Image (cartoon, helix red, strand yellow):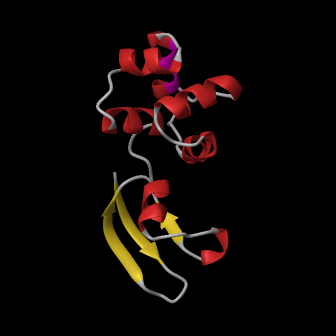
Amino acid sequence: MQIEKIIMANGIVIEGIEGTPAEIKELLGNVNESSNIRVEVPYATNPIAFRRKRLGLTQKQLAEKAGLTIRGVQNYEITNRHPKGEYLVRLANALRVSPKTLSDELNKFDIPV
């Protein structure tokens, strides 16, 4: 995914960076919530599908790594149903991201119904 722009508190605009919001913040250094950086990202695809494809995994491979069924992975990728609890942790680990980051990304992603 490409980040359209990042507007820093001092007015500097950074444009055309590729990655997830978490990766962008990591690239910018130790950015915390008080750093006044706003990242505007409209997800074009479900974050689970985006991260899976970025790692070069098939749905079957992700399901195996996370201890889920292929149908479970498919449901998380194509519906508004977000993984919770243990399933969120399993998916996050398989996708090499923290459960909080994955949860935050999923909450920002909205599938039109």
Q: Which residue: 61% across, 44% down? A: 107
Above or below 9: residue 42: above
Above or below 108: residue 63: above
* 46 vs 55, nearest the viewer: 55
* 29 vs 68, nearest the viewer: 29
Magenta stretch, main secondary structure class: helix
Residue 55 lies, in percent from the top left, at: 33, 35
Residue 66 lies, in percent from the top left, at: 51, 21
Q: Which residue: 43% across, 85% down? A: 12
**Residue 82: which quarter of the image?**
top right
Residue 22 lies, in percent from the top left, at: 49, 55
Q: Which residue: 63% across, 44% down? A: 100
Residue 81 in view (yes/no): no
| Magenta residue check for 81 | no
Q: Which residue: 57% across, 30% down? A: 80
**Residue 24: which quarter of the image?**
bottom left
Residue at the farthest right position: 85
Q: What number of labels is visible? A: 0
* 20 vs 79, nearest the viewer: 20
Residue 107 in view (yes/no): yes
* 106 vs 19, nearest the viewer: 19
Residue at the farthest bottom position: 10
Q: Is residue 55 left or right of residue 83?
A: left
Q: Which residues are magenta?
A: 72-76
Q: Is residue 89 left or right of residue 73?
A: right
